[in-house]
């Protein structure tokens, strides 16, 4: 079955020095395994396959529930269309519109409207862009 080996392995050295080195090596392996940096291998868990659910009954139930909800929503929409908005509601809608306009203006830029109103001309006499030599 196996092919014959042309070269034979070298016999192991025996003696007190080799026994000491073997014991030292085994002790070192043990201490390395006890260190917190050593992470033991996890056992592989068996794969659990899920069984397919019977969905035909569930689909029928969902469709009937959806139809019922649509009918309820249509009835509620008709009721809200028949109502006239009250005066308080109209004022709230106007206030919301004004707040939206202010927010829209603020979003156009990141600066406050009064940022340059103190007479600061940015760029004309700015001290930040001094090209002259200072002595």
Image (cartoon, rainbow, N blue to C red):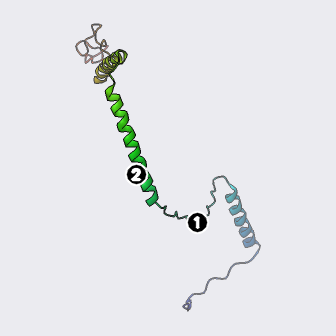
Q: Position of residue 73 (x, y in %)?
A: 37, 38
Q: Position of residue 25 (x, y in %)?
A: 69, 66
Q: Position of residue 67 (x, y in %)?
A: 38, 47
- Please identify the quadrant where the C terminus is shown: top left
- Residue 101: image quadrant is top left
Label 1 element class: loop
| Relative vertical location of residue 86 with respect to residue 119 in this rendering, above or below | below
Closer-to-camera residue (17/71): 71
Q: Residue at x 63, y 82 (%)?
A: 10
Q: Is residue 11 left or right of residue 69?
A: right
Q: Is residue 64 left or right of residue 18?
A: left
Residue 63 is marked as: 2
Q: Are marks 1 and 2 in contact (CB under 8 Å)?
A: no
Task: Tell me the crowding category of disc 1: few under 14, some 14 to 19, or many 20 or more residues within 10 angstroms, Cα based.
Answer: few
Residue corresponding to mark 1: 46
Q: Position of residue 19 (x, y in %)?
A: 75, 72
């Amino acid at each position: 079955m196996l092919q014959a080996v042309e070269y034979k392995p070298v016999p192991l050295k025996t003696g007190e020095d080799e026994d000491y080195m073997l014991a030292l090596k085994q002790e070192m392996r043990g201490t390395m395994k006890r260190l917190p940096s050593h992470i033991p291998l996890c056992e592989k868990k068996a794969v659990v396959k899920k069984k397919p659910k019977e969905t035909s009954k569930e689909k029928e139930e969902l469709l009937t529930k959806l139809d019922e909800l649509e009918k309820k929503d249509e009835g509620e929409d008709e009721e809200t269309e028949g109502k006239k908005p009250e005066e308080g509601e109209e004022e709230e809608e106007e206030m919301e519109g004004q707040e939206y306009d202010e927010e829209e203006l603020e979003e156009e830029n990141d600066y406050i409207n009064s940022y340059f109103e103190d007479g600061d001309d940015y760029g004309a006499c700015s001290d930040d862009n001094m090209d002259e030599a200072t002595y």
